[in-house]
Image (cartoon, coloured by chain):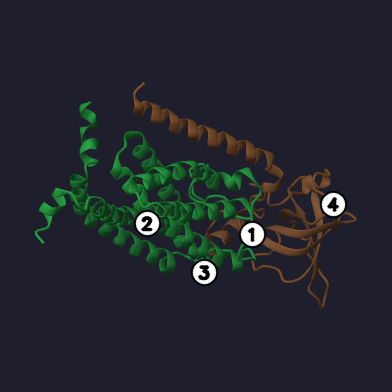
């Protein structure tokens, strides 16, 4: 199984700690550039919408946040499954490190959506399929973090929270398809559409930059947070003592 | 079977079980998960007339009639198969206009839907005003939008 050696090597904490540390600027710098360019393109350069006027610009934060909240949960669930099946502690560390990032973006998505809903729909909140399932996603993140902190023993926390992460993953496709399965107040997807994006390039390009920038931001944050997780888990390991002379 | 493979199948089993259970539950509650009824469902009697419901559709062109000196308004919403007449007395959202998708909350009374709340349903299409203007010039009828 020579093809798997890179995987096993990556799952060794000292190796990952070093690689993740080196990767941070490679994610963080393009993330910063893309987000600054995307936000400028979206909030300043792009034309106003023919119906929504200036208020449509909230999409440049709202849609990438929504995407990240779903991507983070999927990452968490896959990492949890890898951790359970192969007993890889680093996978559990990745899941644990991802949860607060995902929760933050889920909340950002809910708040920006609500701010947009008031002038456009005429209401801050409704209990339609999309909004409700996204709120459940936010609660799943909170539940995952609460469950982890309820255990003193790390290994038990890892296993219990991994099962919750896996069970909750059914909600991810529900969120995406909710607007197609049921009548809802929330509109369908603008970018991922059968007939291609329903947006001219002047609006779409900054949006795609924000999507890419937010995703890279997640990668940078995940590297920082997994390193912190590794430090905490391996605090008595000899490789760490060798790393720092103090 | 190695323990690792056992764990793999256990997790696939959990996912399949939870997935099927969720699908069955969602199917059972399908009616309650619909945020609104469309005019066809109202016309065929699928929508209850004895309690408050939501009806959604597109505001028909030329159907908006306002009572002078008050907020009273009446208009027809359509799903391009059936129509429902809506009466409303209150503040409308900014996006309300003819040809716009809306959702009204209220109750059917003698075939007329008396609404106590009207929300605008935005579609997923975005464009600059100039593009919308030139599109309008080319084709006066906008693409039908309603139930997605």
Give the residue at mark 2: A214
On the question of residue A83 being in view, the answer is: yes
**Relative to the observer, which residue lies in front, B72 or A99?**
A99
Contact flag, marks 2 and 4 (Cβ < 8 Å): no
10 Å crowding of disc 4: few (<14), some (14-19), many (20+)? some
**Relative to the observer, which residue lies in front, A186 or A102?**
A102
Question: What is the C-alpha distance between the residues marked 1 and 3?
Answer: 23 Å
Say which element carries label 4: loop
Percent position of residue A36, x then y: 34, 65
10 Å crowding of disc 1: few (<14), some (14-19), many (20+)? some
**Residue A128 sits in which quadrant?**
bottom right
10 Å crowding of disc 2: few (<14), some (14-19), many (20+)? many
Q: Which mark is residue A126?
A: 1
Q: Chain of mark 1?
A: A
Q: Which mark is residue B49?
A: 4
Q: Which mark is residue A54?
A: 3
Q: Which mark is residue A97?
A: none
| Mark 1 or mark 3, whichever is nearer to me | 1
């Amino acid at each position: 199984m020579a093809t798997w050696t890179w995987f096993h090597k990556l799952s060794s904490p000292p190796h990952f700690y070093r690689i993740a540390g080196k990767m941070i600027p490679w994610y963080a710098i393009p993330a910063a550039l893309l987000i600054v360019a995307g936000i400028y393109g979206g909030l300043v350069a792009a034309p106003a919408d023919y119906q929504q006027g200036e208020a449509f610009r909230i999409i440049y934060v709202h849609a990438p946040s929504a995407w990240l909240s779903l991507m983070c949960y999927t990452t968490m669930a896959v990492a949890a499954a890898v951790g359970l099946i192969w007993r890889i502690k680093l996978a559990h560390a990745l899941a644990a490190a991802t949860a607060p990032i995902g929760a933050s973006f889920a909340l950002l998505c809910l708040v920006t959506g609500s701010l947009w809903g008031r002038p456009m729909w005429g209401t801050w909140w409704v209990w339609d399929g999309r909004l409700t399932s996204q709120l459940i996603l936010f609660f799943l993140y909170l539940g995952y973090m609460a469950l982890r902190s309820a255990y003193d023993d790390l290994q038990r926390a890892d296993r219990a929270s991994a099962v919750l992460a896996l069970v909750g993953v059914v909600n991810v496709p529900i969120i995406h398809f909710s607007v197609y399965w049921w009548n809802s107040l929330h509109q369908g997807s603008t970018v991922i559409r059968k007939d291609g994006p329903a947006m001219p390039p002047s609006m779409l390009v900054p949006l795609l930059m924000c999507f890419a920038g937010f995703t890279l931001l997640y990668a940078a944050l995940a590297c920082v947070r997994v390193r912190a997780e590794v430090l905490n888990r391996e605090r008595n390991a000899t490789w760490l003592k060798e790393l720092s002379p103090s | 079977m190695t323990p690792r493979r056992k764990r793999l199948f256990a997790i696939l089993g959990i996912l399949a079980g939870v997935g099927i259970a969720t699908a069955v539950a969602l199917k059972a509650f399908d009616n309650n998960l619909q945020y609104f009824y469309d005019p066809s469902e109202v016309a065929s009697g699928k929508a209850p007339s004895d309690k408050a419901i939501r009806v959604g559709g597109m505001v028909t062109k030329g159907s908006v009639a306002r009572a002078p000196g008050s907020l009273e308004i009446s208009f027809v919403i359509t799903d391009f198969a059936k129509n429902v007449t809506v009466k409303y007395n209150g503040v409308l959202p900014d996006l309300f206009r003819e040809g716009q998708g809306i959702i009204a909350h209220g109750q059917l009374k003698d075939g007329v839907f008396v609404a106590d709340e009207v929300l605008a349903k935005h579609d997923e299409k975005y464009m600059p005003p100039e593009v919308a203007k030139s599109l309008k010039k080319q084709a006066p009828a906008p693409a039908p939008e309603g139930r997605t």
